[in-house]
Image: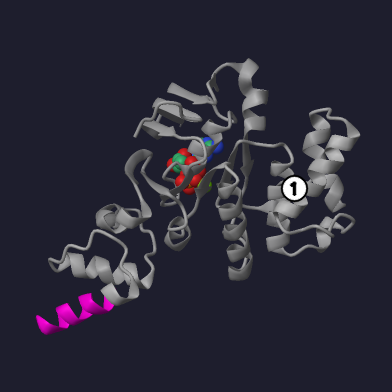
């Protein structure tokens, strides 16, 4: 899908770590300002590679990536692009740089050489955005996994990114921590930030507005949560674990029903009755 004035513009993107094996093949994609996108795919399908290409950590082998009109292949743009597209990784321990919470959040803005008063304000508003006001003086080593991940997000938000990329950021935290993070994502989305959430978890993906599936480096699906289940073949190929209702719909579709959308509880009941009456 392409749009008029996207914040991310990807054209015929290919990437190889080495000559023998391409990690991404010919991807063309636009992401509009303020979109909430989820990227699904099996291990090794190229999700992290795509994320790193978007924030300029990697350069395209072929094709191009533009972030807010700036081409990532141009070394002069990389600093601006990294500030515009912030990334949060799977393991928060890899991102926490200070022993005190407030110093950790201040690290990025300090590198931007912002005035002390601005840094203080950014630390306070970023901690508030992730529900961690009051944690300023805490030692980062004493935080839970979920709190660490929220801190990593706060550190990224303090840079005032326009795009936030979460690369399997919920995979190492417990279900309560996950729920908290998803709530923060929805809140940030409401505030107009562009969100790219990479996950294995279809339930999480259903929170997004748009879902992409990568299959062996190819963009195989570009759809909405409502239509995700009509792509059950791609879901099966990607070995993604379906939620119970989705498993059921997938089975029903295999038996000749045509449910294109995610079902509500009552639609699910009707479908079951229909199936039962045909037996
Ligand atoms: P995902 O995030 O979907 O698990 P990745 O983007 O990490 O997938 O990997 C895509 C492909 O690129 C895989 O085949 C993986 O083995 C390969 N790959 C990833 N990182 C490197 C690297 N640093 N060097 C060589 N190959 C890599
Ligand atoms: Mg990955």
Residue 68 percent across, percent down from the top left: 55, 26
- CA neighbours of label 1 inside 10 A, class few (<14), some (14 to 19), many (20+): many
User: Considering the numbered disc 1 on the image, is that residue within a helix, a strand or a loop?
Assistant: helix
42 sits left or right of 279 in the view: right
Report the label total. 1
Instruction: Give the magenta part as a residue range.
Output: 268-279
Q: Is residue 96 visible?
A: no
237 sits left or right of 7 in the view: left
94 shown above or below 26: below
Circle 1 sits on which residue? 126
Which image quarter: residue 262?
bottom left
Camera-nearest residue between 30 and 91: 30
265 sits left or right of 188 in the view: left
Which image quarter: residue 205?
bottom left
125 shown above or below 59: below
Q: Is residue 119 visible?
A: yes
Quarter of the rendering occupied by the N terminus = top left
Quarter of the rendering occupied by the C terminus = bottom left
Main SS category, magenta section: helix
Residue drawn at x 33%, y 56% is 226
Residue 65 percent across, percent down from the top left: 48, 25
Q: Would you say residue 272 sits in the magenta stretch? A: yes
Camera-nearest residue between 11 and 44: 11
Camera-nearest residue between 9 and 4: 4
Residue 232 percent across, percent down from the top left: 27, 57
Residue drawn at x 34%, y 38% is 218
């Amino acid at each position: 899908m392409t749009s008029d004035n996207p914040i991310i513009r990807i054209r015929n993107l290919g990437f190889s770590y080495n000559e023998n094996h391409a990690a991404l093949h010919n991807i063309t994609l636009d992401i509009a300002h303020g979109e909430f996108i989820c990227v699904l795919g099996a291990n090794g399908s190229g999700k992290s590679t795509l994320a790193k290409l978007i924030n300029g950590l990697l350069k395209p082998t072929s094709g191009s990536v533009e972030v807010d009109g700036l081409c990532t292949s141009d070394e002069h743009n990389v600093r601006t692009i990294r500030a515009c597209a912030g990334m949060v990784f799977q393991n928060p321990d890899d991102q926490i740089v200070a022993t005190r919470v407030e110093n950790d959040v201040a690290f990025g803005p300090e590198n931007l050489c912002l005035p002390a008063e601005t840094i203080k304000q950014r630390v306070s508003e970023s901690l508030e955005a992730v529900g961690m006001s009051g944690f300023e003086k805490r030692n980062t080593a004493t935080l839970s996994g979920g709190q660490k991940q929220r801190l990593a997000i706060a550190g990224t938000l303090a840079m005032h990114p326009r795009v936030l990329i979460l690369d399997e950021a919920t995979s190492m935290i417990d279900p309560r921590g996950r729920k908290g993070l998803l709530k923060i994502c929805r809140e940030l989305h409401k505030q107009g930030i562009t969100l790219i959430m990479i996950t294995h978890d279809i339930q999480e993906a259903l929170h997004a507005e748009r879902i992409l599936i990568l299959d062996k480096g190819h963009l195989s699906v570009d759809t909405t949560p409502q239509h995700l289940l009509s792509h059950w073949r791609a879901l099966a190929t990607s070995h993604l674990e379906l939620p119970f209702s989705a498993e059921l719909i997938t089975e029903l579709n295999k038996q000749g029903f045509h449910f294109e959308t995610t079902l509500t509880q009552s639609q699910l009941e009707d479908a079951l009755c229909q199936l039962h009456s045909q037996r």
